[in-house]
Amino acid sequence: MINKAPLNQYYLNIGSHLLKKGAGFKVGQIVKEKHLHDGIYRVSVITGLFYNFQENKVTHTADKRIVKVDEKN
């Protein structure tokens, strides 16, 4: 076991890793974007991922932010 952790903690670590991998999204990932004007975008960023065991679904929370992009390239 990892650092002499109990077996149930080991199983929880494996389960959380598989849930994160199977969610399809990562925290901080941009989901939607809308171009406002000249390098300024309104984006929706994932701020949290949650697994609902009753409904067997992965849900997320999102936050809307304004992002300025330097388009000199």
Image (cartoon, rainbow, N blue to C red):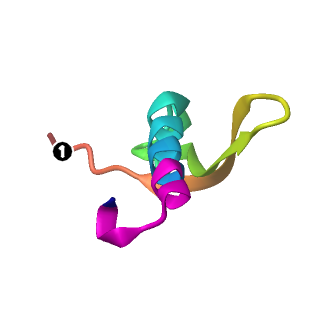
Is residue 72 shown above or below 47? above
Left-right relation of 47 to 24: right
Question: Residue 38: x and y, percent?
Answer: 42, 43
Q: Tell me the quarter of the image containing the C terminus.
A: top left
Left-right relation of 72 to 49: left
Given residues 34 and 39, the one toward you in this image is 34
Residue 71 in which image quadrant? top left
Amino acid type assigned to the residue bearing label 1 in the image:
Lys
Question: Residue 1: x and y, percent?
Answer: 33, 59
Is residue 66 shown above or below 60? below
Q: Is residue 51 magenta?
A: no
Where does label 1 land, which residue? Answer: 72
Q: Is residue 34 visible?
A: no
Q: Give the residue drawn at x 58%, y 47%.
A: 46
Left-right relation of 5 to 54: left
Left-right relation of 20 to 42: left
Q: Residue furthest right?
A: 54
Q: Is residue 4 magenta?
A: yes
Residue 32 in which image quadrant? top right
Question: Residue 14: x and y, percent?
Answer: 45, 45
The part of the chain drawn in magenta is: 2-11
Residue 60 in which image quadrant? top right
State the predominant SS element of the stretch in magenta.
helix
Q: Residue furthest left?
A: 73
Given residues 62 and 40, the one toward you in this image is 62
Q: Give the residue drawn at x 51%, y 60%.
A: 9
Q: Give the residue drawn at x 39%, y 45%.
A: 39
Given residues 31 and 72, the one toward you in this image is 31
Q: Is residue 8 visible?
A: yes
Question: Residue 36: x and y, percent?
Answer: 55, 40
